Image: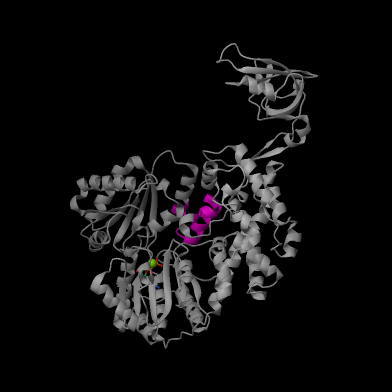
Amino acid sequence: MRPRILFPLFAPVTSLAGVGPRIGAAIERLAGPHVADLLWHLPGGLIDRRYAPKIAEAEPGRIATLTLEIDRHLPPPNRRLPYKVRCRDETGFLHLVFFHAKGDYLERTLPVGETRVISGTIEDFRGEIQITHPDHICKIEEIHKLQSVEPVYPLTAGITQKVLGRTIRKALANAPEPQEWIEPSVVSSRQWQGWRGALNTAHEPQAESDLDPGHLARQRLAYDELLASQLALLLLRARMRRQKGRTIVGDGVKRQQVIDGLPFSLTASQSTALEEITGDMATPTRMMRLLQGDVGSGKTVVALLAMLVAVEAGTQAVLMAPTEILARQHFKVLRQLAEPAGIRIAILTGRDRGKERAAILDDLASGAIAIAVGTHALFQDDVAFADLGLAVIDEQHRFGVHQRLTLSGKGRTPDVLVMTATPIPRTLLLAAYGDLDASQLTEKPAGRQPIDTRALPLVRIGEVVGAVQRAVENGARAYWVTPLVEESEDSDLAAATERQQALSTVFGDRVGLVHGRMKGPEKDTVMAAFADGSIAVLVATTVIEVGLDVPEATIMVIEHAERFGLAQLHQLRGRIGRGEGKSTCLLLYAQPLGETARARIEILRETDDGFRIAEEDLRLRGGGEVLGTRQSGLPDFRLADLATHHDLLAIARDDAKLVVERDPELTGNRGEALRTLLYLFERDAAVKYLRSG
Ligand code: ADP
Ligand code: MG
């Protein structure tokens, strides 16, 4: 149950006085549905109204707050001209200018002979000083309210700065004063205010520097969010550890059989990773390990050998891939490697239905199938395993799948190995997983060919077609990637189809097309034709990015390379250079090339090291954007910015760790406060682990 003290914050924004359904809807679009969302909606700018000159010294262009006596109303002779009000002080005159004004309203607001405080932008109109449509008019008693600094909030259609500001002030006034949840020594060494004080300060910037994410108030609020996120992650891990894990140890026989059949020997980092994995599996706590390795670094074999440990121990293993294509490819590779060792592997995806599916389900339930490869269909309700020992999840570039898995674990407690092809900078790793064990494949397997990467302007596309044609005549195969046109799949598809048609005038029926809209079997047919060589040029939207393996392909053409991210270009390029032949990657770009796009292409030409490329990507794009937070499954922070607050992330991690060690059930005094924090950031799920743990 959410703590009572937070109730007002989780009320709908329409619970605030003056917020009806229409404004409520605008606020919901802008910030979110709850009062708390308004608190997180921090100012993006400010207006300083403290400049209070006399009329004679008022500088045009500046926002000023003046104390003026109303001298005379000058209604316009016709509606096209503005209504003016002449005001004075001891240094001179100034006009207030109103278009489409209501005279009686102005007479009430600005009575002749009285003094008013007026704030707005000073203008110079033909040598005279004026203010058009002042922002504020108030009586002299209220001068302190006006001569101040106003926050300026990001807006959306349907709500004005005034209404939003007023609503946020109301939300702040209603905010509770919860007990401090941050470790006192952190609060004092950082010179932070309490939660409520920090909120108020963040909403009352006095200078531009107060808008900086490094400002103390914003730091504190960011820290709260990071602490909530780290604590939730660590509580989840602690619960997984508490669950009765199992000791999975194999005799090594099947592994040896498979290793003996490999046409290569394992690299040093493959062997190290395997030792780390088997070490985890052998302990009675549950494994949660990340296997990081660049495209082509050989993660599949490591995954297979890990799965064989589970099989040797008499349990089952699954490998879950993010897409159907990838699942089928893994299946093909794993079957070839494992079947000679007498291991039964099956595939289960959303495409399998009816009798065949029923038969597979039976064999999974009886244990007749030792290893299953598939998509998320593997974790549907009707899929039961005799005894699942290990789940390997190939996330490629999408994070977070494993979190869903562990959350919906329903009594299954297999060891978990997550594979990712994206080298993840340490900061992002921490934010996404909290404290996670990671193994890294650092070398590329022997026999990898270096790739010749070249950049050419798009206008030379004719030459490129000619070069591909010559190569194809000599037996080469080429990928031809067409770009993201807009945010729309339709236009991507149109571009790809157009390219296929253009190329077919040169290559005839040896040009194929794959795209995201194709049905699985259709895709497989085209891919198979490319793999066996009947198709020589494969036009593709970015669907080929994920893990396809056709060693005979030695050419990669990327149209509008400037529209792709660095990591994406790197992944695409990783599709070639996999076989015997010398490989070439041609980046076609539209001129003029922007600075960032130029830098990206330069880096790609310079290096093939995925970790270096990830670092450069982080540098070029900054912070949380690197993995595209939304698709990546990284937590979507509202207050924290990983580029600025990475030091806070480390502190939050250490603090959360201590908490979980000392008060794992959050029952102590601070524990209570931390529960409130978890609810505040809607990490309620973590609180559930406490009770059921
Ligand atoms: P990824 O890490 O991208 O999943 P894969 O597992 O698909 O990489 O491996 C890419 C290719 O490298 C495969 O054809 C695989 O058989 C081969 N490979 C894996 N390990 C080695 C090795 N130690 N030496 C040589 N080739 C290897
Ligand atoms: Mg792979």
Q: Nearer the viewer, residue 181 or 432?
A: 181
Residue ranking furthest to the top: 77
The one nearer the camera, 16 or 309, is 16
Residue 254 in the image: x percent, y percent?
Answer: 36, 85
Q: Position of residue 588 (x, y in %)?
A: 37, 46
- Work out whether residue 449 or residue 49 is closer to the camera in this orientation and state it: 49
Residue 326, magenta (yes or no): no
* Colouring style: one colour
- The answer, for residue 375, to whether it is visible in the render is no
Q: For this view, does 131 lie left or right of residue 434?
A: right
The part of the chain drawn in magenta is 603-629
Outermost right residue:
90
Q: Is residue 29 visible?
A: yes
Q: Quadrant of residue 427?
A: bottom right
Instruction: For the N terminus, give its image quadrant.
Output: bottom right
Image spot of residue 459 (x, y percent): 34, 40
Taking the magenta stretch, the answer to whether it contains residue 627 is yes
Position of residue 231 relative to residue 9, above or below, is below
Quadrant of the rendered image holding ligand 1: bottom left
Residue 443 lies left or right of residue 659; in this view the side is left
Look at the picture and state if 594 lies above or below 647: above
Image quadrant containing the C terminus: bottom right
Q: Residue 90: give x, y in percent of width and height.
A: 81, 19
